[in-house]
Amino acid sequence: MNATAQIEPKPAAAAPLIRLQNVRKVYRTGGAESVAVSDVTLDINEGDLLSVVGPSGCGKTTVLKILAGLHSADGGSVNIGDGHGSFVEGRDVGMVFQQPLLLKWRTITENVILPAQILGLPLRAARERARDLLQMVGLGKAGDKYPFELSGGMQQRAAIARALIHDPKLVLMDEPFGALDAITREKMNLEMLRIWQESRKTFVFVTHGIQEAVFLGSHCAVLTAGPARMADYFSIDLPHPRHLDIKTTNAFGDYVKRVYRQLGMD
């Protein structure tokens, strides 16, 4: 008698870390309403580096604030984590802003451990982690320096280390390199990719630079001019590690053209 073959069931696909569905945000001032985000739907898987690109004022930062728990959505749904309390707002989110926002009277190490102090985490362990993080971002010898002793790019590296100090699951970055000169910005893009790969965190990176979005992202979300509407969402199949010369390839150019088309710039 022939034995019946047993078919192993395929493992269920992991749920995305973040799921936004038809998210809408309206600001109300003096009885007047302003729609900041009209319709955003996307999934972000754990370990992704999602770049969010769109023109200035289109609502990118509002989406980031919703992800951070700083704003609530006025429509649609926002699901972060597995729904069983595994994701804690504040504790599991790190943020990097356009300006480093380092406290000038604190050393770099003291700036980096600030979120750990606010959250009441053990400071001895936080200092050890700060040392490791500063080493990872290329500031291993800068822990005892003060912000004014560091360049703009170095200060942003310290800000990234600060965002990682409490071991968050999600790191949100709001145009963190926008104030840097073009050469330093290119260098920071390379550092950003290295830090993402070494930290194994999920990053959401907001930018209005189309080439920057394509170069950095494992995935890219394109938002239209405000109120923000999702125009496109796609994965970026470019090899890692990425180097600046990838920008000269046809594959890179095709992704850039795709974003141009969605923004009506072709």
Image (spheres, rainbow, N blue to C red):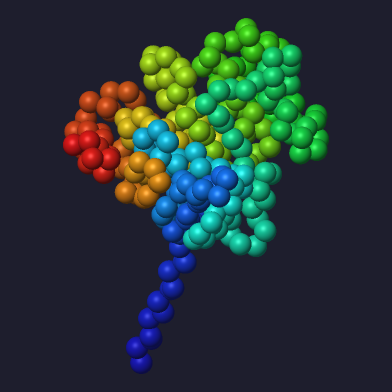
* Extreme residue toward the top, this view: 149
Quarter of the rendering containing residue 139: top right
Is 98 or 38 nearer to us in this picture? 38
Q: Residue at the spot x=73%, y=16% of the render?
A: 106
Residue 17 visible in rendering:
no
57 horizontally vs 251: left or right? right
Q: Is residue 189 above or below residue 16?
A: above
Quadrant placement of the C terminus: top left
Residue shown at 63% from the left, 9% from the top:
148
Instruction: Give the x, y percent position of residue 184.
Output: 43, 15
Residue 4 % position (x, y): 38, 85
In this view, 215 is above or below 178: below
Q: Find residue 129 and report its horizontal and vertical position in percent.
A: 69, 29
Residue 26: in sight, yes or no?
yes
Left or right position of 144 against 25: right
The quadrant the N terminus occupies is bottom left
The residue sitting at 49% across, 38% down in the picture is: 61
Q: In the rendering, at what x and y percent does residue 265 appear? A: 22, 36
Q: Is 91 located above or below residue 23 in the figure?
A: above
Q: Residue, x 55% and y 35% (percent of image)?
A: 199
Q: Describe residue 11's horizontal placement relative to residue 93 as left or right.
A: left
The residue closer to the viewer here, 222 or 145, is: 222
The residue lying furthest to the bottom in this view is: 1
- The answer to which quarter of the image holds residue 254 is top left
Q: Relative to residue 57, is residue 43 depicted above or below? A: below
* Total count of labels: 0
